[in-house]
Image (cartoon, coloured by chain):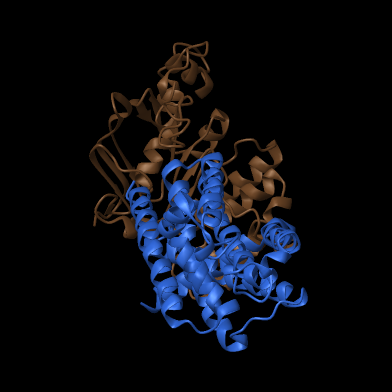
């Protein structure tokens, strides 16, 4: 058992290094959330006067969206890292070591979780520098990071599954397009009470909405425990689906 | 566990649908022998090696490596073997030292023992001075030597080498072959290798088998095999051409790399 944890630990460190190298490659995954934040906070600043819009500023309203996008972008790379290993033959090299096969996937998921939290912290710092203030303060930060890491690991399951099933870089990269509906058909732009019609229904059906609302509770609205718990449950539910798929694809792969 | 047979293959077959990649082959390689497994591209050599190294499931037959059944005792097989694959398989965004250190730990060495073994092997393959550089800055020869060091981290009893000198210049090839020869002589490591360099196979291998289109055609010492050629002073090159044919055959499914990218593989 000790050896299992040690080997998983080494694979986690390797996965983390892989996802951070080279460092300039991380710029897009930080730039995109901050770009959307700055543009939207500027463009929609006057929305704070709209009846029913109950956040102090659009920057603070949009802050959790930027944080969520950082999670999407950083966890989305997990599949690409894996498919690079598969196509280079390195995954085969790891597969013929006498380790518990699950160490390979667990090490990668832990690396995703830590990378997600690091990128979230950078985005949080940028938001604070832009003048945003989080209502739950430092006390809310651990929950914010934990929820982000959980959702990040869940989302990485999509890329990991596609990588394992297709063993194709372009197919794995194409998983990126899923970011758009799951990220934008939410309460990203406006609170739920200001949405209507089919869009409102789609937002309610999108499980990511609940993750976003929990993040927003921690950054913007305060300790709304019901919303926060729902966010964790939604992230856990997504994780069950995506990671089950990833574990299935992984087992299929390692059992030859 | 068998005693002196390092590799034992009994009626081994691998099918992909209707296509037979490995067709009912049987052979035995005694412990400590250098065995050449030769044949043209797509003959079934790599498929056989992938089955023996537990990367691929067989369709039928049996295979034992270091006395262990590749199907029912894969972990024991993995602890006993090293496999230098046809394509160098390293983490190119990590240093040479990081590559070896990780592999050592995954093979069950303690971090301290893994570090010591990595240092020893980096010295042995002449990469100590670049051990901290990322592998993507290494030349082809340096990568191949590091790859070889990686498969030796746990001191395997059986070494599978799939074209270990492919794409290297004669000097780099000689360095690798001398190292392999030393491994066999000094440590009794069994070597099971494929190569397209017949002169190297002849110099290094005590026994050789020829495979083509999945079928094992002949097996023997280099001298025994050369005697089968209808020509005085025949070489293994002559035998290869006699067995396979003078001109490249029209490529068929056997030349495809089976079991890779399903988006590309087998789609028309």
**Residue A56 found in image quarter:** bottom right
Compared with B160, A30 (above or below) is: below
**Residue shown at the point (59%, 74%) measured from the top left:** A54
Residue B219: horizontal and vertical position, in percent? 36, 29
Q: Residue furthest front?
A: A51
Q: Colour of chain A?
A: blue
Decide if residue A130 is on the left or right side of residue B77: right
As drawn, B111 above or below B195? below
User: Residue visible at 70% across and 61% down?
Assistant: A44
Q: What residue appears at the point 46 percent right and 37 percent down from the top-left corner? A: B261
Task: List the single residue furthest toward the bottom.
Answer: A139
Q: Is residue A247 above or below residue A54?
A: above
Residue A159 in view (yes/no): yes
Q: Residue at x 44, y 11 (%)?
A: B230
Indicate the quadrant where residue A14 lies. bottom right
Q: Give whichever of B38, B96 is nearer the camera.
A: B96
Give left or right: position of A159 versus B11.
Answer: right
Q: Residue A240's spot in the image, x, y percent?
A: 35, 63
- For the residue pair A208 and B74, the one nearer the viewer reads as A208
Quarter in which the N terminus of chain A is drawn: bottom left
Q: Which chain is brown?
A: B
Report whether residue B113 is seen: no
Q: Is residue B168 above or below residue A202?
A: above
Left or right: B52 in relation to A225: left
Q: Please provide percent x and percent y for residue B169.
A: 70, 37
In the image, B245 versus B227, the foreground residue is B245
How many labels, in total?
0
The residue lying toward the viewer, choosing from A195 and B259, is A195
Percent across and percent down for residue B142 are 68, 50
């Amino acid at each position: 058992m000790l050896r299992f944890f040690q080997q998983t630990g080494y694979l986690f460190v390797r996965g983390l290094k892989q996802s951070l190298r080279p460092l300039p490659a991380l710029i897009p995954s930080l730039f995109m959330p901050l770009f959307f934040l700055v543009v939207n906070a500027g463009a929609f600043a006057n929305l704070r006067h709209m009846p029913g819009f109950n956040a102090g500023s659009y920057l603070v309203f949009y802050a959790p969206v930027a944080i969520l996008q950082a999670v999407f972008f950083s966890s989305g790379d997990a599949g690409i890292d894996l498919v690079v290993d598969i196509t280079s033959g390195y995954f085969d090299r790891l597969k013929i070591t006498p380790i518990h096969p699950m160490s390979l996937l667990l090490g990668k998921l832990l690396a995703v979780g830590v990378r997600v939290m690091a990128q979230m912290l950078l985005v949080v710092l940028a938001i604070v520098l832009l003048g945003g203030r989080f209502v739950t303060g430092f006390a809310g930060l651990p929950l914010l990071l934990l929820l982000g890491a959980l959702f990040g690991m869940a989302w990485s399951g999509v890329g990991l599954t596609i990588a394992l099933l297709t063993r194709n870089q372009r197919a794995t990269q194409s998983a990126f397009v899923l970011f758009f509906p799951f990220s934008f058909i939410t309460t990203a732009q406006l609170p739920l009470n200001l949405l209507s019609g089919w869009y409102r229904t789609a937002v309610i059906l999108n499980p990511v909405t609940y993750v976003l609302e929990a993040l927003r509770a921690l950054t913007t609205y305060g300790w709304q425990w019901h919303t926060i718990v729902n966010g964790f449950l939604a992230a856990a539910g997504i994780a069950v689906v995506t990671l089950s798929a990833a574990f299935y694809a992984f087992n299929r792969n390692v059992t030859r | 566990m068998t005693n002196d047979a390092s590799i034992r293959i009994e009626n081994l077959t691998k099918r992909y649908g209707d296509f037979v990649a490995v067709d009912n082959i049987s052979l035995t390689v005694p412990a400590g022998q250098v065995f050449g497994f030769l044949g043209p591209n797509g003959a079934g050599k790599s498929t056989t090696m992938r089955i023996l190294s537990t990367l691929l499931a067989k369709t039928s037959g049996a295979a034992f490596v270091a006395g262990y059944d590749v199907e029912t005792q894969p972990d024991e097989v993995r602890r006993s073997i090293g496999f230098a694959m046809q394509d160098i398989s390293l983490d190119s965004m990590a240093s040479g030292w990081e590559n070896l250190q990780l592999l050592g730990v995954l093979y069950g060495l303690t971090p301290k023992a893994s570090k010591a073994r990595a240092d020893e092997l980096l010295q042995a393959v002449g990469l100590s001075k670049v051990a901290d550089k990322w592998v993507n800055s290494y030349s082809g020869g340096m990568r191949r030597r590091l790859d070889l060091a990686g498969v030796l981290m746990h001191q395997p009893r059986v070494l599978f080498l799939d074209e270990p000198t492919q794409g290297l210049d004669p000097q780099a090839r000689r360095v690798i072959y001398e190292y392999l020869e030393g491994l066999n002589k000094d440590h009794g490591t069994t070597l099971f290798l494929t190569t397209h360099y017949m002169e190297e196979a002849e110099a290094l291998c005590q026994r050789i088998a020829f495979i083509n289109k999945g079928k094992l055609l002949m097996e023997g010492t280099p001298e025994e095999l050369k005697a089968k050629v209808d020509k005085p002073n025949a070489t293994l090159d002559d035998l290869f051409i006699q067995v396979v044919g003078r001109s490249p055959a029209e490529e068929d499914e056997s030349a495809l790399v089976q079991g890779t990218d399903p988006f590309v593989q087998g789609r028309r």
